[in-house]
Image (spheres, helix red, strand yellow):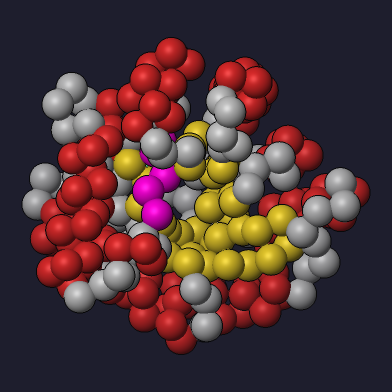
Amino acid sequence: MGIARVLQGIEAACARAGRNPAEVRLVAVTKGHPLEEIQERVLQQGVFRLGESRVQEALPKMKALAQASPTPIEWHFIGPLQRNKAKFAVAFDLIHSVDSLRLAEALGSKALEGGKLQPVLIELNLSREPQKHGLLEEELGEALPRIRAIPGLEVRGLMTIAPYTDQPQSVRPVFAQLSRLADRFGLPERSMGMSGDFEVAVEEGATLVRVGTAVFQPD
Ligand SMILES: *Cc1c(COP(=O)(O)O)cnc(C)c1O
């Protein structure tokens, strides 16, 4: 598909849903891809918002690309996060995957140590798949005020990963549910949609889509 086609897909989905395309930002997921490919397929195409899912893989890339890219890069952490990695995770501009109060506390304390207010999203396991990370929907009401009260953190929104499917229309209810919850709790950001389903996610209110495979596919 390539990044230009992904951006066109986002625009077309916005048009169908009557949304302003400026409300939707593409996070190009670069995990598993080497620097040269990221430069050529993403940065040189004018996208400077990158997502990584492993701290050990991301940190050297962040360092190398900070030197190589004249435009500053916005880094998003999207993968499962262990508390002992909190110190490194606060290097990211947005952490999408806060899935427990204890992780949130660890991030808040490291953010404070670094003199930073760390923007985060809370990950929800809306499809209730046992292998997935994220809070269950019914846990959010109790967890959210506690996480919001942690000094050093700024809760900007919610994130979810829809069940894997080759029928993107079938996961529309999951995205609609994330949007409803974000509305109900007054949270502006909705991180949802990947290569197989980002257009449906945009139609249902995504503000951040995390797309990897489609970006790196040949046109
Ligand atoms: C890898 C990953 C993505 C991107 O998935 P693609 O199907 O390659 O677009 C999005 N979100 C998370 C959390 C991921 O780990």
Q: Quadrant of residue 125?
A: bottom left
Q: Which residues are magenta?
A: 25-29
Q: Please tell me which residue lies in front, 174 or 3.
A: 3
> What residue sits 23% from the left and 43% below the top?
6
Q: Quadrant of the N terminus?
A: top left
216 up-or-down from 14: above or below: above
Q: Which residue is pictured at 53% across the width and 52% down the height?
A: 96
The answer to whether one can see residue 135 in this image is no
| Residue 121 located left or right of residue 36 | right
Q: Identify whether 80 is placed above or below 70.
A: below
Q: Is residue 78 rendered to the left or right of residue 59?
A: left
User: Closer to the camera, 148 or 208?
Assistant: 208
Image spot of residue 107 (x, y percent): 75, 51
Place of residue 90 in the rendered image (x, y in percent of width and height, measured from the top left)? 72, 44
Q: Is residue 63 magenta?
A: no
State the image coordinates of residue 189 (x, y, percent, origin top left).
Answer: 48, 67
